[in-house]
Amino acid sequence: ELKTRRYFEKPYPALSLLDTIKPSVLINKRPKRILVRGMGLSALDTILTFATGAFYRDKQGILRYDPGGSHAHILAASRSGYFPIVRGIPSTPPELKYFTPEALATVKERNHGYLVLSELKKLFEQELKEHFGQDFDLTGYFLPKLTAKEKLRQDIEKAKRGNVVYAICRRILALQLFSQLQPEDKEYFAKSLRTLFLQNVAAMPVINAEKILALFDAGILSTASLGYGGTNVTLGREKLVLEYSESGKTLRISADYMVQAAGDELDISHNPDPFIHFLVKQGEIIPDASGGIKVNLNTYTVLRRSNTGREEESGLIYALGMPVMNWAAERDFASASIKAAYVIATDWTKDLKIKPPQPGSS
């Protein structure tokens, strides 16, 4: 009961959250404090769900937020402390001149059939130098020394002009690189680069970014960076506390409610569905060290563990989408889902035999 009242394991359905928490209603004669764990696209949906006031544009055309009375304070917290990049492609999208299939084939020839992150980074830097005419500051772009609000404001301006770096990243994403990486680079990517990667390809529309900025300006929203250490949530009757570490110190965030909206949580052991737990226990699905479950990405059949402990393709279970190992890091969501559905449907129907209509039948 306590967990249901104060801690929510998922942000959907949104209306159910709104009915339970009621952000405009005071608690102990003060505004409620809602902690949203995560700052990705699911977290953005959650934050905007709690924004029950009115958005409007002032005389300068800047989007503003009117809470319309008492309003909960929303604190969004994630490992990096940043929201996703803002979507904005130049009117003439850049073509890849160095990061090409031919260049990738050359890298694989030199590295026993694998792609290597250090060599991919060089190709990426060449692309950026080609478009900007000088060496590009990757650290300054991807890890700026800015607050979440400052970075968001900067990203909105880049999106409105057409963000060349974002456009190049989207083209590279289509090459589906993750499954081709050498094993040690796969592990490093999953542990150290995945969050940064998702922030820069899973982009939000300009209008949503403007709404988040308006919430900042209205004093309704604040953010926190949790870092990459461990976290712990303690539930009490009056509040809940999220503990995290920074520079060797333990820091705490107190809130009345917490919504788990970290969209990049793929550890299958955290899935609340008992059916998923049963499949893992029986060996019918195998958790992948880099997140999600193991799947043959050519056929989308799930890998299972045989009676002898060997991994083999399942004859019954297929998977596509976020449960699949590093699906988000590998491919464009929409086109990948269509491709996977087509492959699965083709496999399921390949042995069907359709009888031709009989003479005289209607």
Image: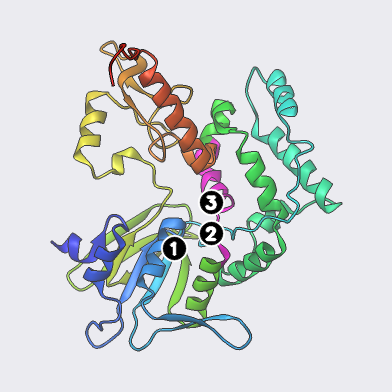
**Amino acid marked by disc 1:** Leu
Near mark 2 (Cα within 10 A), the count class, few <14, some 14-19 or many ≥20, is: some
Name the residue: 50% across, 62% down.
81
> Circle 1 sits on which residue?
44
Near mark 3 (Cα within 10 A), the count class, few <14, some 14-19 or many ≥20, is: some
**Amino acid marked by disc 2:** Met
The furthest residue to the left:
1
Q: Is residue 295 magenta?
A: no
Quadrant for the C terminus, please: top left
> Circle 3 sits on which residue?
202
Q: Could you tell me if the residues under marks 1 and 2 are in contact, i.e. CB atoms within 8 Å? A: yes
Near mark 1 (Cα within 10 A), the count class, few <14, some 14-19 or many ≥20, is: many
Q: CA distance from mark 3 to mark 1?
A: 12 Å
Residue 209: % across, % down: 54, 67
From which residue to which does the magenta span run? Answer: 188-206
Q: Nearer the viewer, residue 337 or 40?
A: 337
Name the residue: 37% across, 19% down.
349
Which mark sits nearer the N-terminus, 3 or 1?
Answer: 1
- Tag 3 secondary structure: loop
Residue 202: % across, % down: 53, 51
Q: Quadrant of residue 307?
A: top left
Q: Is residue 326 visible?
A: no
- Tag 1 secondary structure: helix
> Circle 2 sits on which residue?
204
Q: Nearer the viewer, residue 266 or 163?
A: 163
User: What is the number of the mark on residue 151?
Assistant: none
